Amino acid sequence: MFCGGAGWATQSARRLTSPRYNIKITERWDMQSTFIAKDTFRFRTADRSRRSAVATLVLASATSPIAFAQGALEEVVVTARKVEESLQQTPIAVTAYSQNTLRELGLETLTTISTTTPNLQLQRGAGGDSSLAACLRGMCRTDDIITEEPMVGTYVDGFYISRMQGAFFDLIDIQQIEILRGPQGTLFGKNTAGGAINITTVRPHDELEGYVVGNLGSDNLRGGKFSVNVPMMDGFAARLSYGQQQRDGLIENTSFSDLNDKDYKTARLALAADVTDWFSADYVFDWFDADQTPNGWQPTLVEAGLEVVFPGISATSDPGLDREVTTVEEVYDQFDQKFNGLTLNFTLGDIGPIDDLVIKSLTGQRRTQLSSFRTSMPYYFISGPLDQDYELLTQEFQFLGSALNGDLQIVSGIFLSADEGSYVLQQQFASPVPNTVISLDTETDTWAVYAEATYHFNERWKASLGGRYTEEEKTVDSSLFFPPTGATLPVSELAPTNTFDTDNFSPRVTVSYAPMDELLVYGSYSVGFKSGGLNGRATTVADFSQYDDAEIQAVELGFKADFFDNRLRTNIAAFYQELDDWQVQVNSLDPVNFTFLSRIENAASATMMGVEMEATAVITDGLQLSATLGWLDPEYDTYESQDLATLQPIDVSDQYHFQLAPEWTSSVTARYNRQLGDFANLLIRIDYAYVDDQYFQVQPSPLIEGESYSLLDARVELSELFGSGFSLSLWGKNLEDEEYRTGGFDVKTFGINPPDGLFANSWGNTRVWGVDVRYDFGS
């Protein structure tokens, strides 16, 4: 599951062509299509005869099962350092999810893998399903305004998703997901202070195959997906995938549509061309559309002083999930995302001192459009229509090769990006007429160069040295309109500046030692940064201020080992991180315009340490157990913030918290697989996860804190029914119907009629279950 699949008695092979580095990959699968390993074959220029010979051998093995050692864990190949290498030989803390594991987990969006990855929290935006708050090792950003960027980078086939809006999408045709923990600034660039999420999709290949799956479930769940791979001519192939998912709301709304429903549509077209032995091209078009109702905010406590602005309201307290609510208007979340990507791969062979030189070009264009109405129940509070339009263009050139007879491996590149967007939010407070309309127009231009070299001193010792230099310029045009008075405020025109310029150098040094083939010990020092910017939620000229880059320096020690003839795999990482000028999101309310404020402050310094452990054991040939454990201890060393009442600086280092950074996270998985004669193959999978207490905002607020919770999921599957490609699955998530909070905010006083505070939370999904029917055809 996490560290590799079990190697069962009978396996077959499938040939794929890697779009990454013109590498031929043979994936080994067991009889139940469990991902086991990849064998790589590199081809040089004018090597077509060898290529054909290998293809013949691979295709022959697809019909002749290959026998491997029973009950042994096999190799997992990752691209965490932009080259393919064994997970157990990669000196980075990485959690890898194979295609089959993702299927067993019931992958829909990235939040599916949140609780089974140590020190990772993935939450959808409470106001709408189209944004993703990704938090890793305590590095977190939860405000999805267009001027903000995440602290964990998300990449699909090497293409960067630069905003939280757009990172929450229905995943289809996924080959593998890798979670890279710790700063990844050298190879992945800005905004990877916490780590990176590296998603790889299935590339078209030269066999006719595919699948169709349909599902039905609780709360009127219905949907389906299909994917078909079509070889078109020698070296050319296409793959078309489509999915749709609908479900009624999990929270009943007595006035309008139920909340937290689901209506996804996603499509993907991939084209692959191996034109010659030295040139290949890949084009992909992705489309995702969502038209649904958000989860929303539910009051935890309302203090009676608010009756001045909310007639009829009385003091209420409801610390639990309310499954029946009332909204003042119809709420909605409509999101559309389109992506075009072109990857060109040139395998140039030996040129001068460089061997096996590969040059890649990745050109991407992503556009997202959002229209939503968000609210708290049952009041007009921190609510209102939101319209956003955003476009990102990226261009990256990668240069990969080796030297010194293969002892030196080199990864280098150039990255450029340009984005622009518009954002209009009509904020309402106690009235259907907006109090404030915030209009933002943004532009960001970035360029970077990077390189990392790995030298093999011998078969046991190797060291890496790398660095990345980045320059960035951001422009934000901000204006406010106040409908009650008709006044306007050209904020950015009156501010001292509406631009932010920065540059950064992010180095990384790694040393690893393999005392034996099944053991790796490594240590690393790395630097990452979260770029600064301007406070987009400012409602005064004074608040339209810059915040600086945040930098993180991390030391990591790791241990990766396979024991007992590869029947037990254990990966452990311990880390210590120092944060300088750390960016902290502080929420408040404008006491004059009653507009929600989210101010970014630079904390002076902070430190954190933690440990992550992952283990997978083959108990018998059919039973596999996996477990993860994460421990995290963050604290501010010095931090001065502005007191919202006196406007004077105060020391809050002992009071403020890190968002979505539970001290403990853990999970246990039991997976049992057995062949039931000629009838079917039986799979039983049980996942249990635990998440410790956590804070949803930086300021202390015990009334909205997240208490610890545990989730129990299960899946029972019968595959290859009567020797066919049909499979039948029964699954359930949150089987114990645990009520748990996933977000929260407060406004302790409005200054109108104290006490007049409001405290609200968002909640995780209630129990859901369903049945999947799937048919796989072709190879």
Image: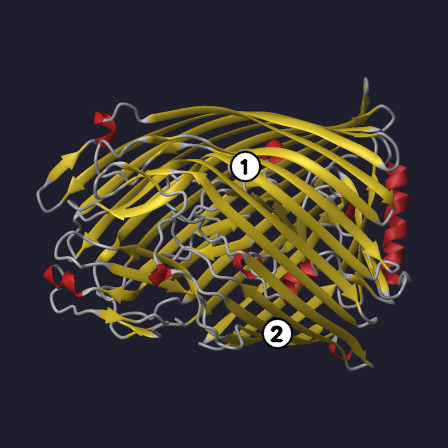
| Disc assigned to residue 578 | 1
Q: Residue at x 73, y 67 (%)?
A: 625
Q: Residue at x 73, y 52 (%)?
A: 571
Q: Residue at x 77, y 40 (%)?
A: 23
Q: Position of residue 202 (x, y in %)?
A: 67, 51
Residue 600 visible to an observer of this rendering: yes
Q: Are marks 1 and 2 in contact (CB under 8 Å)?
A: no
Q: Position of residue 187 (x, y in %)?
A: 63, 33
Q: Residues within 10 Å of mark 2 (few under 14, many from 20)?
A: many
Identity of the amino acid at label 2?
Answer: Ala
Identify which residue, 448 or 301, lies in the foreground. Answer: 301
Q: Is residue 186 above or below residue 709?
A: above
Residue 71 placement, left or right of 539: right
Q: Is residue 739 above or below residue 348?
A: below
Residue 165 placement, left or right of 481: right
Identify which residue, 344 or 419, lies in the foreground. Answer: 419
Name the residue that disc number 2 marks. Answer: 714
Element at label 1 = strand
